[in-house]
Amino acid sequence: MLVVGGGNAGCTAAIAAARLGARVRLVERYGFLGGTATAAMVGPWMTYHAGSADEAGRVTGGLAQEFVDRLVEMGGSPGHLPDASDYVPTITPFDPEMHKWLLMAMCEEAGVQLLLHATLLDVLLDGTRLTGVRVQTVSGPRTMMASRVIDCTADALVSHAAGVPCEQGNADGRVQPMTMMFRLSHVDLDVTAAWLRDHPDQIRTSLDPVQFSATTLTAVAGLWDLWRAARAAGEVDIPREIVSFFRGAHPDEVSVNMTRVTGLDPLDADDLTRAEVEGRRQTMALLSFFRTRVPGFAQCRLAATPAQIGVRESRRIVGEYQLTSDDLLQARRFPDAVARSGYPIDIHSPTGEGTRTTRLPKGMTYEIPYRCLVPLRVDGLLVAGRCISVSHEALASTRLTPTIMTLGQAAATAAVQSLAARVEPRAVATDALRASLITQGVDLRRPEPACA
């Protein structure tokens, strides 16, 4: 079995398949694993819960939860924390450097064969059946044959090359903006908390101001007056309307999610280049803003910037079912569901300021059917990650890391079962698939009443 793309979906797929007895090779273009979580430093992970931050509200288990448990043991994550900004029930900070190693270690434990620094060149087809891929390595092109291929490239690179129909963006073809996350260290959040206690109108939270502390302020969204003053003075020109940062994996560190690069196509090499340059320009402007304007950040340092800008949205496959915003908002259930989530539809404006959030009914979750992982026209192939078969609006929720981890585990389990049954992935018995995922700890509970 071949997994292309070593992000969180790809690593989860590779580890799950190997644990189920398959011989697995994982191909990744970087010299490390983790994809968006490590290469783009997108964090914290949001969210492992829906409705409440306790066990009753948990929606994500399996390998996704194992990653967190092991990072906690390593000192690379404080685990699931209440979201002080009230956007979601919990956030899960993590150390990207420790996550890189954890994924390698878990792949090694499972017997996954890694091939790093390998870029997809082409695919091999026998009629409508995918039989392998060609990649470029430092030692030259290499051809790899496989009985099953799982596309975890985020951009649907394998699927697109194989002739799977794909879509991109909204009705106008516009995608959500790209964002360059970055981490600041040497931050004194006690000072920040003290200032916010005196200015409680400057933060979005349900916490009582007397509760504000370096520990409780796991996420800060607001500081509107500071941001408006900086914009009025010409210090920043970033199309964001709010200051947003999160507690990091370590006490003096925060992760900043504020850059916004609009109007560019992440699948166009020239546009992606422009985005990388603009993202770093905005990062440096924000570093100055935090140092000069935000209490507690006077001595902060730019601890890390990512290897690449974060991409929210690019190409999506057209599969046997396309999940829609209506499916999410109606908390729809499916007989072949392989993952669930309660994350809202979270669309950052493709053209400028503003973020549109549409929430599910409180405490409700939606399900993602297995058919969203099964592409049209091509056999021998499954898809996991943000490029599954969903609408532009639904992608604004399904793209979140805990969900795509679960999708990787589902795709791997289905691939193994299809080989055992000697059927194509689209013919897998989904009752058996769901039963296996539940045995592996994937959370497919249905505690709330069924929707009409």
Image (cartoon, rainbow, N blue to C red):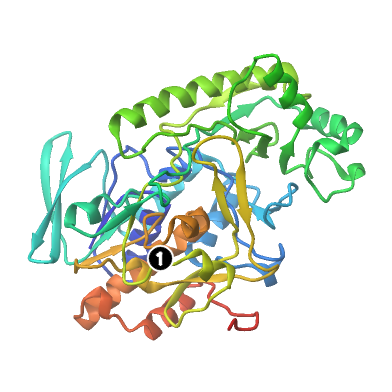
Viewer-side residue, 213 vs 260: 260
Q: Residues within 10 Å of mark 1 (few under 14, many from 20)?
A: many
x and y percentages locating residue 296 in the rendered image: 77, 25
State left or right for residue 2 relative to residue 246.
left
Which residue sits at x=41%, y=31%? 307
The quarter of the picture where residue 410 lies is: bottom left
* Percent coordinates x, y for residue 165 in the rendering: 25, 59
Is 183 above or below relative to 322?
A: above
Q: Position of residue 426 (x, y in %)?
A: 27, 76
The reply to whether residue 19 is in sight is no
Snapshot quadrant of residue 130: bottom left
Task: Give the residue displayed 37% in from the left and 63% down from the top.
Answer: 389
Q: Is residue 156 or residue 347 the one in the foreground? A: 347
On the image, the x and y values in percent for residue 248 come to: 64, 39
Compare residues 48 and 379 and report the one nearer the observer: 379
Closer to the camera, 112 or 335? 335
- The quadrant in which the N terminus is found is bottom left
Q: Which residue is under mark 1? A: 409
Q: Amino acid at mark 1?
A: Gln
The answer to whether residue 134 is left or right of residue 410 is left
Q: Is 19 situated above or below 159? A: below
Q: Quadrant of residue 61?
A: bottom right
The residue tagged with tag 1: helix, strand or loop?
A: helix
Q: Is residue 423 above or below residue 311?
A: below
